[in-house]
Image (spheres, rainbow, N blue to C red):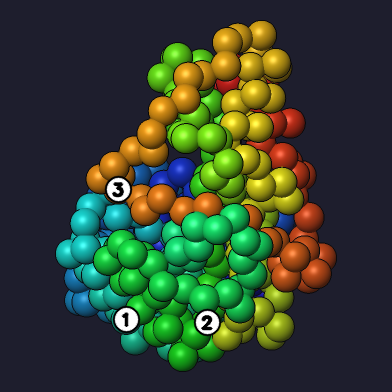
Amino acid sequence: MSATLLIAGHGYLGQELRRQASAAGWRVSALSKSGDQHSLPCDLTNREAVRTLASTLEPPTAIVLAASSDRGGPDAYRAIFLDGTRNLLSTFPDSHLLFVSSTSVYHQTDGSLVTEESLTAPVRETSRILLDAERLILASTGTVARLAGLYGPTRSVILKRFLQDQALIEEDGRRFLNQIHLADAAAALLHLASRSESSRSQIYNLADSSPLHQGDCYLALAQLFERALPPTGPRPENSKRAWTHKRVSNEKLRATGWEPTHPSFVDAAQEVARSL
């Protein structure tokens, strides 16, 4: 019997994960709040709605919680990531739950290399809520995947701003950008789901192999697209994401046998630009 995968959150990442898992022979079910052609309607924050899944789905081998906060604040984060995690754990206690967290939990501003063992003391309350959800997952022998900035077909904030002449090099451009291509992020999650015995109760950083200084990134894009370098200016204030300066290491994940097919954002930029 083939392994079964439940994807809780059928957005940009969830849809790519469904595509890859189905191609790899997994039997896949997906959930989204309103439902669509390839997903069942389910509000993860509603305990009874999640519990009804037990009567319609067999307990999945693995569950990937890849839901979005819909750009909400702390209340939305608590409902989706804390309540949603509890509801899935209570409904499918024997399934391997993988939680898509964020590298925003790393607060470092000194350009240091951060690993899964690095201190996490984020400024933003939303990132602290992610850490609370991570603790629930790890206590239940699940897996935490801390996702770097996601980009891919039709999506790249950095590239869109650059091509629309809205980019800004902050201060001296020293801040590191940590990203991962959509296809590589989905492949990493599927890889970890396939390695349930060794990945349980573990944290992994999902990032590419080339953290880039912001200034170096825009310089490379300027050369690649033969456009002017963006102007410099002060770092943004009151940003939804806290200002950080760190290099996220993917060595622990690569040591398990995963390798990114897009090790650098710059190498994929032209391909992504054609889809924007």
Q: Residue 191, which numbered label?
A: none
Please name the residue that numbered disc 2 is placed on. 142
Please name the residue that numbered disc 1 is placed on. 86
Q: Quadrant of the N terminus?
A: bottom right
Please name the residue that numbered disc 3 is placed on. 240
Provide the secondary structure element on which disc 3 rests.
Answer: loop
| Percent position of residue 85, x then y | 35, 76
- Residue type, numbered disc 3: Lys
- Residue type, numbered disc 2: Gly
| Percent position of residue 18, x then y | 55, 52
Instruction: From the viewer's side, name the closer residue of 1 and 19.
Output: 19
Label located before the other in sequence (3 or 1): 1
Estimate the spatial distance between the alpha carbons at disc 1 and disc 2, rounded to whole Å.
Answer: 12 Å
| Percent position of residue 22, x then y | 62, 53
Label located before the other in sequence (1 or 2): 1
Q: Can residue 254 be seen at all in this image of the molecule?
A: yes
